[in-house]
Amino acid sequence: EIVMTQSPATLSVSPGERVTLSCRASQSVSSNLAWYQHKPGQAPRLLIYGVSTRATGIPARFSGSGSGTQFTLTITGLQSDDFAVYYCQHYNNWAWAFGQGTKVEIK
Amino acid sequence: QVQLQESGPGLVRPSQTLSLTCTVSGASISSDGFYWSWIRQRPGEGLEWIGNIYHRGNTYYNPSLKSRLSLSLDKSQSQFSLKVSSVTAADTAVYYCARSPRVVVAGKGGFDYWGQGTVVVVSS
């Protein structure tokens, strides 16, 4: 069973800043890695799949990188709409798992 | 426009079986390109993958829940369903259904479409 670990648990940032969120897998997940944005009362929103491919309609300020077991989500020029919880998630043909999430809050 | 909608009781008694249904529109539940999924969020916690089902009947369960889970499909109604047996207060959560593309067919992964979620409370 692959375990996903995100850090930090909470990030306090100001609008306009660049934000970097980390995700580590307990074993290699190849390129089967996605990122989500989740706001209270809403369904999670797929941001990135395949480590670095933005989902339909996702702004270019969201970017993903990494390989194997270490991955990063970067938000460049944080906007007020971006304050939320972000999850990484691995997928394959028999198991799926989320990290515990990183909350991006207003400083 | 792909849409998913969860339905089912909002209150379940302890030790009973939780049953939810997800109705899919704008996509074929019989497509080779997708799994159909359940995810939940317990109060104050993160997202937890529950299980996936494929239209040929293959099922994939979270190991921590596997002994209490059952997923099924009704192609005629374009619906898939979740049953969790022997529930406790720890099963109180927002339950989401979602679509999961098969990487080898769709060329992408993750959960790309979600229902709005339904709150299930386990209480006597």
Image (tube, rainbow, N blue to C red):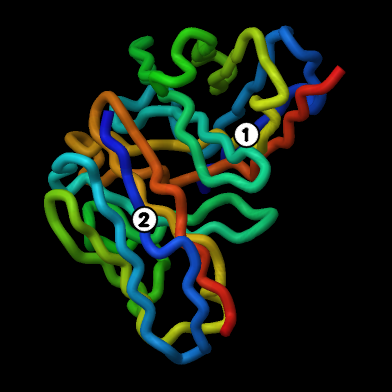
Chain of the residue under the numbered disc 1 shown in the image: B
Residue on which the image places disc 1: B95
Image spot of residue A7 (x, y percent): 37, 61
From this viewpoint, which residue is outermost toward the bottom? Answer: A16
Q: Is residue B45 above or below residue A35?
A: above
A96 sits to left or right of B84: left
Position of residue A11 relative to residue A50, above or below, is: below
Q: What amino acid does circle 1 point to?
A: Tyr
| Closer to the camera in the image, B123 or A55 | B123
Secondary structure type for disc 2: strand
Q: Amino acid at mark 2?
A: Gln
Query: x and y percent of residue A2 in the render?
Result: 26, 34
Count of numbered marks: 2
Mark 1: give few (<14), some (14-19) or many (20+) Cα within 10 Å.
many
In x, y percent, where is residue A105? 56, 74
SS for dot 1: strand
Q: Nearer the viewer, residue B59 or A18?
A: A18
Outermost residue on the right side: it is B124
Query: Which chain letter goes with mark 2?
Result: A
- Residue at position x 35%, y 27% from top? B31
Q: Quadrant of the C terminus of chain B?
A: top right
Q: Relative to B107, is A63 on the left or the right?
A: right
Label 2 neighbour load within 10 Å: few <14, some 14-19, many 20+: many
Residue with the mark numbered 2: A6
Instruction: Give the residue at x 82% y 22%.
Output: B123
Dots 1, 2 in contact, CB < 8 A: no
Q: Residue at x 34, y 34 (%)?
A: A96
Nearer to us: label 1 or label 2: 2
Closest to the observer, A102 or B70: A102
x 37%, y 37%: residue: A97
In the picture shown, does residue A27 fall above or below A44? above
| Inter-mark Cα distance, 1 to 2 | 22 Å
